Amino acid sequence: MSYANVSKYVALLMTLLMTLLNTFGVFTNDYDKDKGSVTTYKTWEECVEELDSIAAEGKKSDCGEDCEHCPTIVVPGIGQSNTYLCDAFGNKVKNENGDVVTGWPLYVNVDEVVDKIAAPLVTAIATQQDNGFSDIVAQTAADALSVNACGLDGLPVNNIVVEKYYKSVAECTEEERAYILKTIPLDGYVNEVGADHLYYFAYNSFGDTLGIAEELYAYIQMVKAQTGHDKVNIVPISLGGTIANALLYLYAEELKDDLNRIVFIVPALDGSKIVSDVYGLNLSTEDEMLYSGLIPSLMPDDYLAYVINMAIRLLPKQVLADTLDKVNRKLVTDVLANCPSMWALVASEDYPALADMWLSDEDHAYLKERTGDYYQAQLESDANILALRDAGVEIFDVVDYGVPMYSIAASWDDYNADGIIHVDSTSAGATTSLVGSTLSTSDYKAGAVFNCTNPAHDHISPDGSLDASTSILPETSWYFYSQNHESTAKNNIIMYLAIDLLVDDAITDVYSDERYPQFMYARNTRGFINSDIPLAESILSEEAAAPGTYDAQLIADTNAALAKAYHMVEYGNIPTDEVEAIKAELYECLYASGKWTRPDPSQSDDNTEEYALMFFKAANDALYKYYGPIGFSDYMDGEFWKYSKKK
């Protein structure tokens, strides 16, 4: 393997690690401490004024006064709002290749990163010493991801403009509507209620949480005015859960008259322990995190993940560890310390110590006060939710569990999670065992507070790892086993449940509808429902139009497969492996009908990729087994030293 290729692989590794960290934050260049925010984007105060003005224009919806459906506002998660770097005139900035520079999707010029890192990397590999390599990588990371910089006022330094929708989905352009419904697949809601009753509250994921919440409150008033309804539903998703916390904290009394239902979907109600670890400079650089598990978890079923795992061994372990440490420090000192929305993702139990660590100097006094206000909102989250519920607002929660956190965080295996957020946060207090184990009564029941005391109710998950009765919402929370946070929207049952909660007042708790028991399972069915089932149905329609087109056995098999598929699509109590078996049975019908062509193993590129995956995985596993978590030179030095001692 050439040095050029090695440098590209390692640069890709660094980019992957930076991107992972940017799941919750971004790197940035130095900012002017005296100026803070110096650009032309609208502040939340200006947004509130604009929303108030729009609300004053009055009703736009065609629905009558007897409309039974409250309008719904989606409060999306991190990165689910498009943002752009703009000049002072509002024009989108482009790079030298003519590509628009975005705040999100995350903008990284990989070629530029490779160019800057390649030569220092070659030197580090040739000498097996740092030689400033780790400092260059950290600075390159900061330069590459500087778009979302924040100042000491907690606001973006650059002119980051959010693509916002101060209007219903019905008024959106075709492109805007397609983006919204692809991001959050609520087509069923639009079909049932109407696009004029669906709104999408876009915001900058790297902004001021309390300010965004003030804008959301004004947005709610606008929606009420435009639709003529007295109440709205809100759907806070992931990071949107932090916005909801702030909203309930700032407007606890007012919202009792504004809200009909809240449908939380994997909300970060108490942050994420991954973010706490990043702020605490507590990344895992030991053993299988770097050399075995991390990259394959980010690039599943990709042989390149194992190539990277082997390539990074060309650097001594200490050089690699120092590089990650410096990148982490750069992340915190340059961005996370100044970004209120990222502080909102720190678990409440970790905030006091971490705030003292990063915000105790005079320069950060304002940010410590501002983030401290959100910390208070976090502490009062349970009480605020329950107060709304007691005032008549119906509140529901959808939770994923049974997936370890990404192993870049040192505490990755200390919590049951959905890959990104620990379950205690998304569930508002459910008790869990570690992934792969079961609850022990003696471990938690003595000190647990049970919010459901009805002995007829069983809130223990089928796998024995979760007790929902300690959550503040034991009767109105649904749990999906082994569902990854990032693929939540691909689970049709989660989307169907959310839609039904928004349109069907008859669903009041986990006992209301047999299709949605409290405990359900992970699945990836979006493409299966949208494409594969209709294709199988075309077999039957073609046979009906021209009898004899297909043989009788295929028609019988297709009918049977579709019957199972229809049932599976509607019911969430079918385990993941059974879902996959049902999908496979339908796929066989598509192959037999000629709708799909079965791949030829001797001609398939996929087959080549499969063999490459098997080969490189075996090679990587062998390296880890025999070399352990070290670089090649670390091993060679150790062997040479042992040999020399024997001589």
Image (tube, grey):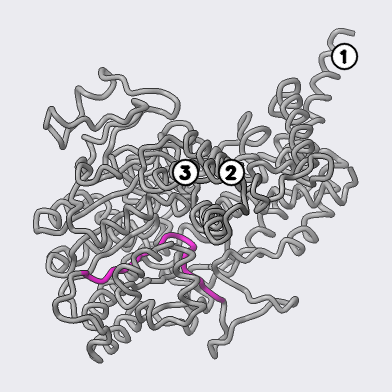
Disc 1 versus disc 2: nearer the observer: 2
Residue numbers of the magenta segment: 69-84
**Percent of width and height locating residue 83:** 51, 73
Q: Amino acid at mark 3?
A: Arg
Q: Amino acid at mark 1?
A: Ser
Q: Which residue is mark 1?
A: 644
What is the residue that sits farthest to the top in this orientation? 646
3D distance between C-alphas at marks 1 and 2: 72 Å
Q: Which residue is mark 2?
A: 554
Say which label, 3 or 1, has the lower sequence index: 3
Q: Is residue 135 above or below residue 229?
A: above
Q: Which residue is mark 3?
A: 523
Magenta stretch: includes residue 79: yes
Q: Nearer the viewer, residue 491 or 41?
A: 491
Q: Quadrant of the N terminus?
A: top right
Query: Which secondary structure class fits the magenta region best?
Result: loop
Tell me the number on the disc at residue 496: none
Q: Quadrant of the C terminus?
A: top right
In the rendered structure, the answer to whether residue 519 lies left or right of residue 408 reads left
3D distance between C-alphas at marks 2 and 3: 27 Å
Say which label, 1 or 2, has the lower sequence index: 2
Q: Quadrant of residue 130?
A: top right
- Mark 3 near mark 1, Cβ–Cβ under 8 Å? no
**Percent of width and height locating residue 262:** 24, 59
Say which label, 2 or 3, has the lower sequence index: 3
Tag 1 secondary structure: helix
